Image (cartoon, rainbow, N blue to C red):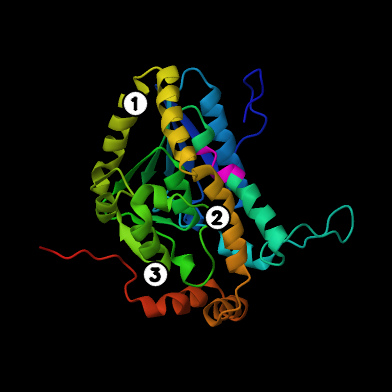
Amino acid sequence: MKDYRGKWLYEPETVLFEVDGPVAYITLNRPEARNALNGQMLSEMHDAMLEADDRTDINVMVLQGAGKDFCAGYDLKLSYQGRGEKTEMGDYKYREATKRYDDDCWSMEKTQRWALVMPSLHKPVIAKVHGNCLAGGNDLALACDLVIAADDAKFGFPATRANGSPPAHMWTYHVGPQWAKRMLFTGDKIRGRDAVKIGLVLESWPVEELDARVKEMADKVGAVDSELLSAHKRIVNLALEQMGAEQIQRMAAEIDARAHLSTGPRRMQFKADMAEHGMKVALKNRDAPFGDGYVHFRED
């Protein structure tokens, strides 16, 4: 993030910011953690996007991930270890997600302000997706204006099987009610080449072609004046707002908080597995009843 003189107030540690002509490339950069989302990364991504939206030499942004994945979701280790740290004020506790309904809502609304900044930006954002694009990563991609993916990229929200409901909801607006329910009811994943068929993704390409295809699209969009791009984006987003998209994001956070209060056997087993055995075992047990966990289409 820069001040009014163009000097960096701080150097981001989990996000890369690069400019190529009229295109800003914003890269989630925690490859050792499969770009799992934490507060620092979301805050730095948010600030990088505001920086690009402010700069007059940039017309379009590309959001991408370093390493093998776009983003594997939220950092569950942090989510389940709690926040009750001591501060200079003494044994003071911050609001802690999943403990009380209102605190959970507050926490997720704060996260939304960082994670769902894309619709409020004046300039278009293209999500370039490869590898895993799951849970919170899926939320990021669906908040962008265009999604272009590798054929073998993996989209989905497996956490709906035992952990909660997505705290952001653009599913219905992309794929309609039946596919939204099908994906949320099962937590199944869908590959990029199939995600195109249901409208979740605009285009998919072989992974070796993805960089070139996204650059081609970004350069084409970037050739249009930013004022015109802003006008086009604003009218489409206003139409989405008329369909309730902005209010639904608020409701999604509240519904997720409600889901977190579930005492059903699958949720309680997941929490017990996390506490006793760790994330790897918890995920394995959660996903065991779902086969390979993918959407399959009939081959004609």
Q: Residues within 10 Å of mark 2 (few under 14, many from 20)?
A: many
Q: Which of disc 2 and disc 1 is earlier in sequence?
A: 1
Tell me the mark number nearer the camera, choosing from 3 and 2. 2
Residue at 50%, 37% (x, y): give it.
118
Residue 239 left/right relative to 271: left
Camera-side residue of 70 and 251: 251
Q: Secondary structure at mark 3?
A: helix
Camera-side residue of 105 and 81: 105
Q: CA gap, disc 3 to disc 1?
A: 36 Å
- Say whether residue 130 is visible: no
Marking on residue 252: 2
Tell me the quarter of the picture where residue 103 sits: bottom right
Q: Which of disc 1 and disc 3 is earlier in sequence?
A: 3
Q: Residues within 10 Å of mark 3 (few under 14, many from 20)?
A: some
Residue 204, image x and y in percent? 26, 46
Residue 57, image x and y in percent? 47, 18
Q: In this picture, is 251 found above or below 52? A: below
Locate the N terminus by quadrant. Answer: top right
Q: Which residues are magenta?
A: 113-118
| Residue labelled with disc 1 | 221
